[in-house]
Amino acid sequence: MGSENVKLPKIDFSDEDLKPGTLVWNQVKSQVNKALIEYGCFEASFDKISVHLRQSIFESLQELFDLPLQTKLKNISKKPFHGYVGQYPAVPLYESMGIDDANILEKAEKFTQILWPQGNPTFCKTIQSYSEQLLELDQTIRRMIVESLGVEKYMDEHMNSTNYLLRVMKYKGPQSSETKIGLNAHTDKNIVTILYQNQVNGLEVLTKDGQWINVEPAPDTFIVMIGDSLYAWANGRVHSPYHRVMMKGNEARYSVGLFSIPKAGYKIKAPQELIDEDHPLLFNPFDHVEFLAFYYTEEGQRCVSALKTYCGA
Ligand SMILES: O=C(O)CCC(=O)C(=O)O
Ligand SMILES: [Fe+2]
């Protein structure tokens, strides 16, 4: 059960002067560092995404999930969890779809074309602008993390090592006051995840001391979470938390995640500056795409930490 009394830290990214080197940058950076060591997660207010866009994104999600199943199944991907996912007996409330490189107009158009051959410019523009604008928050946070780790010499390499995936999600209301599983507990496998949801709560995050926190974001805040690939790159200096979705009541929950994901062929390797006697190397260098292939095998699904089994040092 979620715990009532603990709240995730809330950090404000709306200051106009939030540029590297400014006083406010350093203040926010130290809040980010503290939150990521303690929770691997925080609530972010970020006002670059207009109120209009924040509303349109949920209209677009609803329009997409209202399409006939036949149409939704047309979104196929070779990468697990990037195509259409739904109708799984283990998580019957859950449906999702991934849009690779949704920040790039041609990619957003290609995706839109698959579902609406006759075109849907509003949908296309909404997901593209949302991704392009929110990516700024991902990059700000990652710059701050690299600075806090004191490994600025890897800044460009790190910033250029990822692509973006936008995943849209719907959780049906279970039509009961009893809590039902929406999405099983997991850690994200990517670099940074930024989640945004409609007004139906359900996300829970596990603290280091084993309590599930109910995440109750305000309408204008995003949830930022660290994935296992960044945990590995930082050699354990930031936490990647377990989280899950628990649903009750009648209302559907819509959420959307922007995931920064290591590019195929890029080897994730902790900088040597982050390895010492007190911090021995945790993971051998690995390729994220190859790791995911292992994660989605039966063995990978059974492990407590798939990454440790795959490439633990
Ligand atoms: O819907 C949510 O808020 C969480 C989704 C999630 O954890 C994921 O897609 O990895
Ligand atoms: Fe997740």
Image (spheres, rainbow, N blue to C red):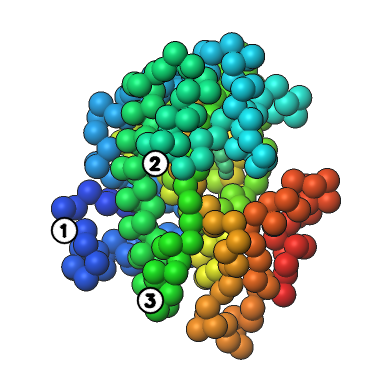
Residue at 41% in and 17% down: 119
Residue at 48% in and 17% down: 116
Q: If the image is split into quadrants, where does the N terminus sit?
A: top right
Quadrant of ligand 1: it is: top right
Instruction: Return the residue at label 1.
Output: 17
Spatial CA span between label 2 and label 1: 25 Å
* Helix, strand or loop under label 1: loop
- Is 206 rendered above or below residue 247? below
Look at the image and tell me whether residue 143 can be seen: yes
* Helix, strand or loop under label 3: helix
Spatial CA span between label 2 and label 3: 26 Å
Relative to 3, 70 lies left or right: right
Instruction: Return the residue at label 2.
Output: 103
The residue nearer to you, when weighing 202 against 118, is 118
Q: Amino acid at mark 2?
A: Asn
Going from N to C along the chain, the mark reached first, 1 or 3, is 1
* Helix, strand or loop under label 2: loop
User: Which residue, as the protein is rendered here, is positioned at the far right?
Assistant: 299
Relative to 130, 99 lies left or right: right
Instruction: Return the residue at label 3.
Output: 152
